Every structure is written in C-alpha cells, then in structure tokens.
C-alpha cells in the first residue's frame, strides 16, 4: 500500500476536531482530517432537542471570529437573541462552519493508529495507509457512553444509551424507563412523553435541580459578583472552570479527577462544580406530565422474555419492581483510551493515564510525543470546560500553537543554504 508523509492527522470531524483543523489551517500547518462531519449530532442526538448552552456559548472555534452562531443565524434569518438553540439550527451552523473553514474533511474512518520511530502510521477504512508526524485525536463522545454496571447484563434490544436515539417516535405506546437526572435524561423523558410513549423517570437524587428563569435586563453588581456569568452557566466555581482551564490544569491530580467526576454525576461533595440539572424551559414539559421516582436507584436488572424487570431501592429503603419494555440510560459519558477501536494495543500500553484517560501536557500532548487528545478525553486535565462547545477555542488554540511553534522551530534549524535549495532559490 502507498504510504505518504503528513505533518498532522486529525481524527474526528466533530466540534473539537473541526475547530482544531480551522486553527491549524490559519497557522499554515498542513494536515488531513478524517471523519464524517458532525456525524453524532446528525444521527444520534434526538430530533426535537435543544442545546443546553445559550447561543453565545454554542460557537465553534474560529481563529478570525467571523463564523459565529449569531452571524449564521443573521445570514439565514433564524431567531437568535433570546431564542433556544435547536439541534437543527446548530447542526446547520456547524456544517456551514466546516464547509467554510475546513472544506478538506475526508469522510472516511481511521481503522488503525500505531506508533513508529519518527511519528505514527494510520490506516483508513479505504485501505490507504499513511505516516503522520503528529496526530490529534478528537473523537468527542464516540465510544465514551457510560452504562452503570447494574444494567450492563441486559441485551441490546432492551437497553440503550440516551445517545443511541435520533428518532424517539419508535417507542410510541411502549413502556420505557429513563435513568438519570440531568438535561439528557429530562429532555429524553419529555420527548418520549410527547411521542406518546409510557415513560417513567428514575432519579437517584432526592430532587431535580432546575435552572432559574433568566431575568430580563442587566444584572446588578452584587448578582455579577455573587454568581458571575460564564458560557457554562452562572456561579463562581463554574466561572472559574470556564475562565481558567490553565489554572485547573495545575491543581493536584485527585482534585481534578474529583471535580470532573462530580460534574454531572453527584451533588453535595466539597469539590462540587456542576451537578445534573435541567434547563428552565424544560421544566413544564416534565413536571406533572412524566411520572418521576426521586431518590430511587437500580439494584438489579434482568431480562424476562421481551421485558425488563428492574429491582429498585427507594429512599426509605423499600424495594419495588418495575417491568417495562425498554430502559434508556441517560447516565453520561466517561472516556477511556481502551474504548477507541483504532488505537493499537501497544500504543495504549505506552500512554500514561489517569482513570483511563491520557495525562496531557499544557498543550494537550500525551506522554507519547506528537500524540494529542482533545474534547472529553482531556477533561481530567483541563476541567469540565472540555465537555462543552465553548471549550473548543481553548483546546484548538493551544494545540495548533504548539504544533505550529515546533514546526517553525524545525524550519529555523535548517541551514540557510539548504533552505534556499529546498525553495528553489539561487544565491
């Protein structure tokens, strides 16, 4: 098979991959980027969904700042100010961003990535093989779906993750339990109910936390100081995570891990940042419309014919059985390098990791020189910001800057005579 040398390969064409590629392109770094553009957003997010983030926090990372969601909405005559961001609007914007700033995306999967003496070897699904000096892994949430151990023995036809469904209408008339108390669980339950499914929401916590309805007009100085605003939401800890990922990086490792694990998982710990919660506009679509079991956890789940029987523990220690047609786990994501099917096992064994995620440099470079990870894979290093669209700018800027700096350093180390010869310049 023909092999070619390539300065940089980007694996993944979702928000973090495309943003990184846009920054590399702006710095004059040659690259190839592989993946189906915004595939997960187009095929796995439920139709009718709205983004939890506000419009100003839903931009991809444009080094020039000309391709924002607001500008796209103005061009397309779509509502923006004060409007929720629909899945349809965001995917249209994201594809427009990709076509304008990264038109060279190759819609092909990487089937193998291995380390070589002076770089990396990649094999594409087409059979093409190539060598790259540097690789950026930007696979997003793919292969990171988290299913609690109590549910993993259920067969696929009875159990799914909330990310598995673009069309929830197929559950019309069926009994479904949704497990979780965050935005994904709440919106999945609402959409199922609106699709005429018989849905029950199972929440481990004693209550559901709903965001406050935004108040019109400017906030007072006291409000801004007490709960500073950020792209990730309001609150001092949230603001710090959004504004200072570099400072987060320098926290002790265990604190970083606890903060990220706490995000979206549990409440009431000393390192709490963002627990599971729901957008204010979702509340009326859930409360009074969907049966909710608060303070309930699944102790055991088993398949009985075409049904699922859940043994559930209540807040008072009592137990009950729920028999349903299907269980949807809206239980979030946890990245593991071992879950990426294209990574060679030898490469995985050489990576230094924490909680199965790579330990990274301040420039997102792993313990294997030239191999970078971004998005959720970098959250234990830079914080919950890497789970949000607004994290794309920080990651893309740091990665592209490091790669471009090293590339320029390599060029400057070439003697002037050799450089002239390479450029076809005679003295």
Image (cartoon, rainbow, N blue to C red):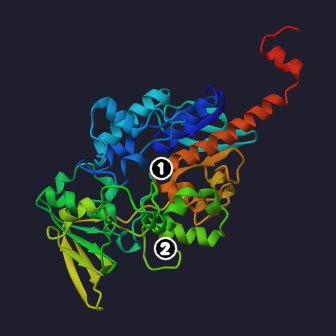
Which element carries disc 1, helix, strand or loop? helix
- Is any atom of residue 340 visible in this view? no
Viewed as shown, does residue 10 lie left or right of 109?
A: right
- Is any atom of residue 15 visible in this view? yes
Residue 262, x across and y down, in percent? 48, 71
Asked whether 142 or 363 is in front, the reply is: 363
Residue 335, x across and y down, in percent? 51, 59
Q: Which mark is residue 292?
A: none
* Residue located 82% across and 29% down the image: 412
Residue 413, x across and y down, in percent? 85, 31
Q: Which residue is mark 2?
A: 272
Asked whether 300 or 141 is in front, the reply is: 141
Q: Is residue 323 above or below residue 414?
A: below
Specify which label sits upstream in the sequence, 2 or 1.
2
Classed neighbour count for the residue bearing mark 1: other residues with Cα under 10 Å, few (<14), some (14–19), many (≥20): many
- Residue at the extreme bottom of the image, as rendered: 317
* Residue located 67% across and 49% down the image: 363
* Residue located 31% across and 66% down the image: 212
Instruction: Measure the alpha-carbon separation of dots 2 and 1.
Output: 20 Å
Classed neighbour count for the residue bearing mark 2: other residues with Cα under 10 Å, few (<14), some (14–19), many (≥20): some
Q: Which residue is mark 1?
A: 390
* Residue located 65% across and 27% down the image: 4
Viewed as shown, does residue 332 lie left or right of 78?
A: right
Residue 426, x across and y down, in percent? 85, 8
Q: Is residue 269 above or below residue 74?
A: below
Q: Is residue 195 above or below residue 296?
A: above
Rendered-image quadrant of the C terminus = top right
Which element carries disc 2, helix, strand or loop? loop
- Residue at the extreme top of the image, as rendered: 426
Q: Is residue 102 above or below residue 382?
A: above
């Amino acid at each position: 098979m023909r092999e070619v040398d390539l300065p940089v390969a980007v694996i993944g064409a979702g928000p973090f991959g495309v943003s990184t590629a846009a920054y590399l392109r702006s710095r004059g770094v040659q690259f190839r980027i592989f993946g189906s553009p915004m595939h997960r957003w187009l095929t796995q997010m439920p139709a009718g969904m709205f983004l939890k983030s506000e419009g100003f926090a839903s931009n991809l990372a444009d080094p020039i700042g000309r391709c924002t969601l607001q500008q796209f909405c103005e061009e397309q005559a779509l509502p923006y100010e004060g409007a929720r961001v629909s899945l349809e609007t965001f995917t249209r914007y994201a594809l427009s961003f990709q076509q304008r700033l990264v038109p060279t995306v190759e819609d092909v999967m990487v089937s193998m990535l291995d380390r070589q003496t002076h770089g990396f070897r990649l094999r594409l699904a087409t059979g093409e093989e190539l060598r790259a000096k540097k690789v950026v892994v930007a696979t997003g949430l793919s292969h990171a779906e988290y299913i609690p151990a109590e549910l993993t023995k259920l067969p696929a036809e009875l159990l799914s993750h909330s990310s598995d469904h673009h069309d929830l209408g197929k559950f019309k008339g069926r009994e479904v339990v949704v497990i979780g108390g965050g935005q994904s669980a709440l919106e999945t339950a609402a959409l199922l109910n609106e699709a005429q499914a018989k849905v029950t929401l199972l929440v481990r916590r004693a209550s559901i936390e709903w965001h406050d309805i935004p108040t019109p007009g400017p906030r007072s100085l006291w409000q801004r100081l007490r709960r500073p605003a950020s792209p990730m939401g309001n609150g001092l800890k949230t603001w710090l995570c959004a504004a200072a990922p570099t400072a987060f990086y320098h926290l002790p490792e265990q604190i970083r891990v606890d903060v990220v694990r706490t995000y979206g998982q549990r409440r009431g710990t000393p390192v709490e940042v963002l627990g599971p919660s729901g957008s204010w506009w979702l509340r009326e679509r859930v409360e009074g419309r969907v049966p909710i079991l608060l303070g309930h956890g699944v102790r055991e789940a088993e398949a009985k014919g075409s049904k699922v029987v859940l043994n559930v523990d209540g807040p008072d220690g009592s137990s009950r059985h729920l028999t349903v047609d299907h269980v949807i786990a809206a239980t979030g994501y946890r990245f593991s390098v071992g879950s990426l099917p294209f990574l060679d096992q030898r490469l995985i064994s050489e990576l230094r990791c924490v909680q199965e995620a790579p330990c990274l440099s301040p420039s997102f470079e792993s313990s294997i020189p030239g191999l970078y990870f971004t998005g959720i894979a970098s959250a234990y290093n830079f914080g919950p910001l890497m789970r949000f669209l607004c994290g794309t700018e920080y990651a893309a800027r740091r990665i592209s800057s490091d790669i471009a700096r090293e590339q320029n350093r390599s060029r400057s180390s070439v003697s002037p005579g050799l450089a002239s010869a390479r450029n076809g310049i005679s003295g």
